[in-house]
Structures are given as C-alpha cells and as structure tokens.
Amino acid sequence: MENFRRNFSALEARQRDSNPMKVVIIHGYGGEPMHGFRPWLKAELEAKGFEVSVPAMPSPDAPRVDEWVAAIGREAAEGCVLVGHSLGCTAILRYLEGAERKVAGAVLVAGFAEKLGDDFKALENFVDAPLDFAAVRRNCGKMVAIFSDNDPYVPLSQEKVFREKLGAKTMVLHARGHFSSSEGTVKLPEALSAVLEIAR
C-alpha cells in the first residue's frame, strides 16, 4: 500500500511539473457529459493534475459513427487516455482504427464491439463493418475493459472479445448493471484506478 501511495504521489508531482496528461471521457447512447459516474471521475482526475475533457457527443439519441469519431478526433491528443461508457467505448474503438495519434491507453466501461440485437438498430452503424482489431491495438498503449455480470444490454461474452481480440486487461464487477446512475453508479473507483495505472 505504501508503494502504491508513493507511485501516485510521484504521478501527481509529474503532472504538476509538466504538461498535464489529457483524459477524454466519452458518454454513451442517449447520454450526457456530466451525468452518471463522469462528474465524479472528472473531479477526481482534475484533483490529481490531469486535464479532463467531457465533450457532448453529437445527436446522442440518433448517433452516427462518423460524427462521433470526428468528435473524438477533435479532443484526442498524442499520449492521452480515452475513457468510454457503453456506445462511447465503441466510438473510441472506431476512432482508434484510423487514429493518426497513438494514445497512452483506453478505459472502456460496459463496451461492445458487436451488434447488441434488434432493440439497438440505431447503433448498428457503429458495428456494421468488422472492427480492425489489429489497428486498434497498434494505436492504443494499454487497454482496460470493465464489465458487469448483470448488464441488461451488453452480454458478458463481450469480455472475451475485449480480452482476446483487443488484448485488454478485463475485470467483471458483480451486480453493477450497465454502470448507470439509475442503477446507483455515480462513482467508479475501478475506472479511476485504471486511468492512473495507464498514466504511470
């Protein structure tokens, strides 16, 4: 534990003494920037010296993959960390396919890389084309993917996809649903720890 504290104290010192690392947090389908666990995560990261952006994604109720990828591209910087929730994860993967700037890593919460079923046809433009997993891996340093064992939308089979095809470090949390505020998730320490791990 003492080594853990020293590592993060050193990270905070580096953040203060140099250009701060940027973290970009991307909300999901029908989401809002400062809702769910995002306000808490933004505040925690800013307190540790990070520059944090939480953009409003275009047309969140009728999302288009090209518009979301372009929006991420306007925010992303070389060596930044991308954090996504739900569709925000899929958008990040699509951005990384063709990214011109390699990112330090990505933290993906309740993400999916395949079709979710007939109830989510509005999202199929994000997953219609096969994902270039190799390109995503080339453009992303470290990847951490967080799932819940009772997510009503994202099947747990996606954990294997992220682990085996994307090389992500994965974790499955118990009874966290889709990590939404309506299910009680307004803080997500696991996501914070993942960002700090990538930043070290």
Image (tube, helix red, strand yellow):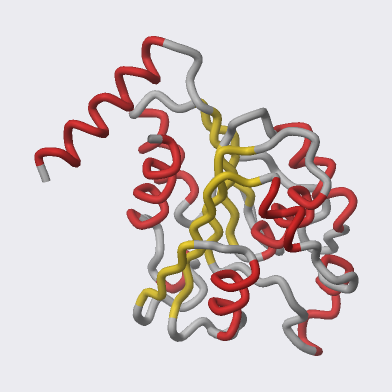
Q: Quadrant of residue 41?
A: top left
Q: Is residue 170 left or right of residue 129?
A: left
- At horizontal 69% and vertical 45% (from top left) the residue drawn is 139
Q: Quadrant of residue 7?
A: top left
Q: Position of residue 187 (x, y in %)?
A: 36, 55
Q: Looking at the picture, does residue 86 appear above or below residue 173?
A: above
Q: Position of residue 143 (x, y in %)?
A: 54, 54
- At horizontal 71% and vertical 62% (from top left) the residue drawn is 90
Q: Nearer the viewer, residue 123 or 167?
A: 167
Q: Looking at the picture, does residue 87 appear above or below residue 199?
A: below
Q: Residue furthest left?
A: 2
Q: Residue furthest bottom?
A: 118
- At horizontal 23% and vertical 27% (from top left) the residue drawn is 9
Count the marks: how many? 0
- At horizontal 69% and vertical 48% (from top left) the residue drawn is 138
Q: Position of residue 116 (x, y in %)?
A: 73, 83
Q: Residue furthest top?
A: 17
Confirm whether residue 125 shows in the render: yes
Q: Is residue 41 left or right of residue 10?
A: right
Q: Nearer the viewer, residue 77 or 139?
A: 139
Confirm whether residue 30 shows in the render: no
Q: Quadrant of the C terminus?
A: top left
